[in-house]
Amino acid sequence: MATANSYTILLVEDDPNDVLLIQRAFKTANINFPMQIVTDGEAAIAYLTETKAEADHEKYPQPVLVLLDLHLPRKSGFEVLAWLRQQPRWRRLPVVILTSSAESGGINHAYELGANTYLVKPVRFEDLVVLVRTLHLYWLILSEKPDVGSEFEKPIS
């Protein structure tokens, strides 16, 4: 399990402006966890496929949280989420949908596929900073982290 200082966030976002705003919001909120960025659905799957015990952990650190946009090139966020939840190694990895769409069909579909939460990107930067602080507090500080990254289920004792 990663230590609090080494928690890595995987941001899956294709819009360079949104990437910049999210990074800036983390910096403004004084949240200094490492962030790995991939810009399409296939790259997200490739990244997680490379994140293995024997892989280069500096190049592919294991994420403790995924921030996933839904509207991505090559594979949609829905396809990435469906793939994640089919992988024994990643099915417990917390996935926060962070997208611009508040369409109820998409929201319901994301939860059906196993999203942990669904958030709409705020328009105002100040609201994005509040969202990032809330994500940090809940997902990286208060919540207990599941055991992710191992291929086998551990029995409940």
Image (tube, helix red, strand yellow):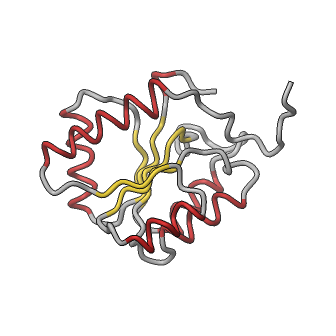
Q: Is residue 88 left or right of residue 131?
A: right
Q: Is residue 44 left or right of residue 121?
A: right
Q: Is residue 2 above or below residue 13?
A: above
Q: Where is residue 97? Give x, y as percent.
A: 43, 56
The foreground one among 113 and 148 is 113
The foreground one among 112 and 121 is 112
For the C terminus, the image quarter is top right
The foreground one among 7 and 55 is 7
Q: Is residue 147 left or right of residue 9?
A: right
Determine which quarter of the picture holds residue 12. Answer: bottom left
Farthest residue, direction bottom: 74
Q: Where is residue 86? Give x, y as percent.
A: 72, 61
Q: Where is residue 35? Give x, y as percent.
A: 40, 42
Q: Residue at x 56, y 65 (%)?
A: 80
The total number of labels drawn is 0
Q: Residue at x 37, y 56 (%)?
A: 98
For the N terminus, the image quarter is top right
Determine which quarter of the picture holds residue 141. Answer: top left
Q: Where is residue 10? Give x, y as percent.
A: 46, 48
Q: Residue at x 46, y 34 (%)?
A: 139
